[in-house]
Amino acid sequence: MATASLQQVGVIQKDEARFYVVDGVQYPSVTTVISATLVAPELQNWREHMAAKTGSTRAANAIRDAAAAKGTMLHEAAAQIAQGEEFIPFTSDETFIDGVLAFEEWLRQTTVEILAVEQVVVSRIWGYAGRLDIVRRKTGRKTYTLTDYKTRGSSAASGLYPAHRLQTAAYVQAFRESFPGVRIDDREVALVSREADADQRIRIFTLHDQPHDFTAFANLLGVYRWLKSEHR
């Protein structure tokens, strides 16, 4: 990999907001910027659906938290796999394990080189940072792809969200700044199903129009700074 421009990296968690301290400078995380400025109606609709289905908001929140926990476990497992380590299940959830194994098979079949895993990148130009999932070179390609992976449920709404486009576009920009000698030309989101009866355990969305999506993220970044300023 090209020599990184990052020297020292720390993480500060303030409630649900996350900040990266890079070379002594504090930057808001990509996900913090998006969650603070973007209304996600698909998530609100999902919460309302689950509250109606279960009969209580508390039960719906418990389902949401369980899904988030599986998302965290997926990232831990995927990092093991991407770094060439043997996947050792740390849960007895067979459905989750099957999903991870499907992800492992897909990744190995479509990848010839993995360049970065769980890499912190920073945009000093725009003033934000984040931790991407994987940068890899796919079969038959000479340039690199940024791959972000998420878990999804079985409902039709559990697909690609606008936040995914914004998040990956921000990561690509920051990666290009952090590793200027590496050519990264495209990005994709891999959705790993949490359901055993899903028609597809892995769904891949290849994302296009990086400049358009990054412009949208940059606009949210401006809104975020305005909200955090003393002159709002």
Image: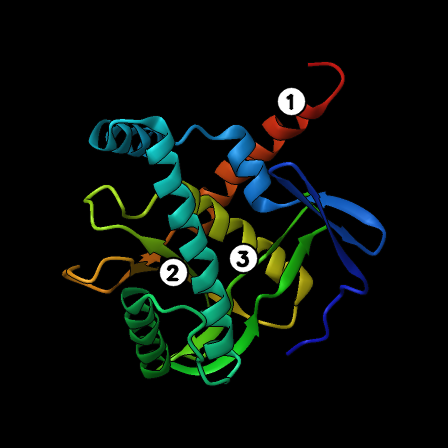
Above or below residue 228? Residue 138 is below
Mark found first going from the N terminus, 1 or 3: 3
Furthest residue toward right: 24
Residue beneath disc 2 = 188
Q: Is residue 166 visible?
A: yes
Image quarter hosting the N terminus: bottom right
Above or below residue 89? Residue 201 is above
Q: Is residue 207 visible?
A: no
Q: CA distance from mark 2 to mark 1?
A: 30 Å
Mark found first going from the N terminus, 3 or 2: 3
Label 1, secondary structure: give it: helix
Residue beneath disc 3 = 172
Which amino acid type corresponds to the residue marked 2 in the rendered image?
Glu
Numbered mark located on residue 227 in the image: 1
| Contact between labelled residues 2 and 3, with CB atoms less than 8 Å apart | no
Label 2, secondary structure: give it: strand
Q: Residue at x 27, y 46 (%)?
A: 158
